[in-house]
């Protein structure tokens, strides 16, 4: 399941962790494979009570980095794994180049995955994103990967509400928040990205409904 947003701070990770807690209460075997708090205290509080698979440490060019340990998750074999920041590029030396490739390995092993991403990381929307923001998104996910998801959940927040969160320091620290508002986090830009996310989610829902209508039970035989 993909929790889809249009910008940092709309609540994707928080919602993913809420669902992880709900599944745990239902008796499901749930772990957190990767969690990026970004210093957001309400999100950090949501991790309490959930099992976290320790990250692996990788040395690259004299520095140590932490990445999701897909091998440890596969060895643990949970029923469900929560994985933050689906489009992330792994540091060189990792088993796979992209986090979405790690997620595919988990899915191939029969582990269900909850994950988060923003709409601008979809490969097919890369040109539109550059036109809207003037920014070239480097970390993209092929559309076919997202289309394989069992569900896409839009995490929506009006741009003005997101800007209020930013101003309160709930998204970034004061210095980074001001820089964000001067650049990416301008209300017209956020409104355009939100519209993009709404359209993409509607498209995913329509596609899944069409598949259900056209499904022939004989195809299983």
Image (cartoon, rainbow, N blue to C red):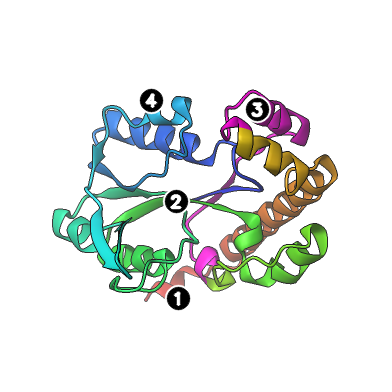
Q: State the extent of the magenta-drawn residues as a range.
A: 145-174
Q: Nearer the viewer, residue 48 or 110?
A: 48
Secondary structure category for the residue under label 2: strand
Name which residue lies at 81% across and 40% down.
Answer: 187
Name which residue lies at 25% across and 65% down.
Answer: 109
Task: Give me the disc on residue 165.
Answer: 3
The answer to whether 211 appears left or right of 128 in the picture is left
* Up/down of 183 relative to 220, above or below: above
Q: Earlier in the sequence, mark 3 or mark 2?
A: 2
Secondary structure category for the residue under label 3: helix
x and y percent of residue 32 in the render? 30, 44
Count neighbours of disc 4 (C-alpha within 10 A) and say few if under 14, some if 14 to 19, many if 20 or more: few
Q: Quadrant of residue 41?
A: top left
Q: Quadrant of residue 9?
A: top right
Residue annotated with mark 4: 45
CB-based contact (under 8 Å), mark 4 and mark 1? no
Residue annotated with mark 1: 219
């Amino acid at each position: 399941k993909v929790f889809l947003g249009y910008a940092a701070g709309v609540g994707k990770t928080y919602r993913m962790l809420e669902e992880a807690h709900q599944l745990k209460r239902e008796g499901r075997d749930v772990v957190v494979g990767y969690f990026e708090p970004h210093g957001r205290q309400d999100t950090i509080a949501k991790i309490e009570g959930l099992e976290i698979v320790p990250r692996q440490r990788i040395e690259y060019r004299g520095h140590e980095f932490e990445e999701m340990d897909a091998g440890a998750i596969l060895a643990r074999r949970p029923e469900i794994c929560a994985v933050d920041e689906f489009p992330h590029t792994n540091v060189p030396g990792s088993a796979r180049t992209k986090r979405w490739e790690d997620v595919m390995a988990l899915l191939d092993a029969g582990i269900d995955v909850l994950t988060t991403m923003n709409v601008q990381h979809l490969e097919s929307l890369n040109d539109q994103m550059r036109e809207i923001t003037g920014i070239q998104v480097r970390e993209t996910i092929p559309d076919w990967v997202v289309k394989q998801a069992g569900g896409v959940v839009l995490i929506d927040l009006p741009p003005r509400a997101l800007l209020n969160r930013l101003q309160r320091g709930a998204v970034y620290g004061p210095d980074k928040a001001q820089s964000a508002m001067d650049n990416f986090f301008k209300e017209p830009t956020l409104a355009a990205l939100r519209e993009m996310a709404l359209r993409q989610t509607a498209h995913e829902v329509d596609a899944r409904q069409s598949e259900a209508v056209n499904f022939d039970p004989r195809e299983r035989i």
